[in-house]
Image: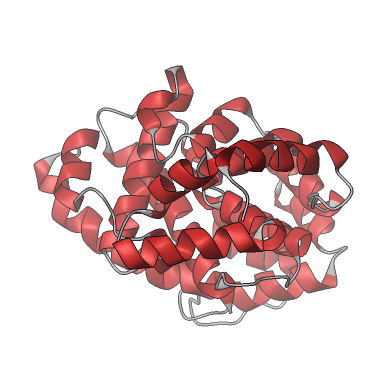
Amino acid sequence: MKTATEFGPSLEALLQSGKQLPSLPVLVIQVQKALANEMSGLRDIAQIIDRDPALTARLLRVANSAAFSRGDPVTNIGAAVGRLGMGHVRSLCLAVGVVRAFGDASHRLDHKRYWQHSASVGMVSERLTSESKRYARVDGAEAYTAGLLHDVGLLILDQFFPEEFAGVQEETDGDLEARWRVEQARLGLDHGAVGGRLLERWQLPDAVRLAVAGHHQPESAAGPAGELAQVIWGAEALCSALGVELGQEGAAEITPTEVLDQCEVPADRREAFLAEVGLIGERALAFTH
């Protein structure tokens, strides 16, 4: 297992070589650009997705799942995009893209649970921006993307550094310590920082990659990225406390009440919002099946 002084250079060598490093599929990048373009309509986005039979099938399956179904089944991608909404389409396309980028080469990480957790954190992050008085300025779309990708560093560690991943997991489980703290001590940086380096290579927006990099230590990120990191940090704690945790990360280090206090969610909205977090977890399950 690599020491902290060895791991950093090994990660940098992987990032610089690009030979083994996964990249987002071109079609996924095209969908993301179309979704970001205010001039694009449902038809434009549907035409891009229609080029990919596997992505089309996944969107139709999710649109017709119990979480989203409204009675009559949808049979074409335009109707599916309309039913799911731009946010869920964005999330699903990114999720499918990252799954393809990394393939099935998993050593210890449960990918289905990973994506349920990640999709939940993305959706809760976006909702938190509209419920929070303190972080109301944070862009909901960026919160969605950063939340969805917040743990992408775990995929890098699992696939390319399996010995280090396993060693950290053993210590996390044995000491009941938060995983990111063990990573910091053993490797010199946590999975958030690892993910931030990958997103830099993928050329995602600075605020997103910096928030992902700092989501376990949001006070370390400055400016708008710091506020976005606080939202992701809070959303993950809420998901973890309300049944959509990723067990390999260890227990949440802050309670739901502390998150709601920190984010200044009004008292009369808290009960309904926490109930919604539970429903979001059920919806996120549709992204993994």
Count of numbered marks: 0
User: Where, by quadrant of the figure, is residue 234 drawn?
Assistant: top left
- Residue at 43% across / 54% down in the picture? 121
99 vs 207, left or right, is right
Judge by depth and name the residue closer to the eye, 183 or 202: 183
Identify the image's colour scheme: rainbow, by chain, secondary structure or one colour: secondary structure
Farthest top residue in view: 223
269 vs 234, left or right, is left
Quadrant of the drawing holding the N terminus: bottom right
Q: Is residue 160 above or below residue 191?
A: below
121 vs 250, left or right, is right
- Residue at 53% across / 52% down in the picture? 151
Q: Position of residue 51 (x, y in %)?
A: 88, 63
Q: Position of residue 14 (x, y in %)?
A: 78, 44
Quadrant of the drawing holding the C terminus: bottom right
User: Where, by quadrant of the figure, is residue 287 drawn?
Assistant: bottom right
User: Where, by quadrant of the figure, is residue 107 drawn?
Assistant: bottom right
Residue 210, visible in the rendered structure: yes
Judge by depth and name the residue closer to the eye, 2 or 250: 2
Judge by depth and name the residue closer to the eye, 229 or 192: 192
Q: Position of residue 165 (x, y in %)?
A: 57, 60
Q: Is residue 142 above or below residue 84?
A: above
- Residue at 54% across / 30% down in the picture? 210
Q: Is residue 214 above or below residue 114?
A: above
- Residue at 50% across / 72% down in the picture? 113
Q: Position of residue 31 (x, y in %)?
A: 76, 49
Residue 203, visible in the rendered structure: no
66 vs 21, left or right, is left
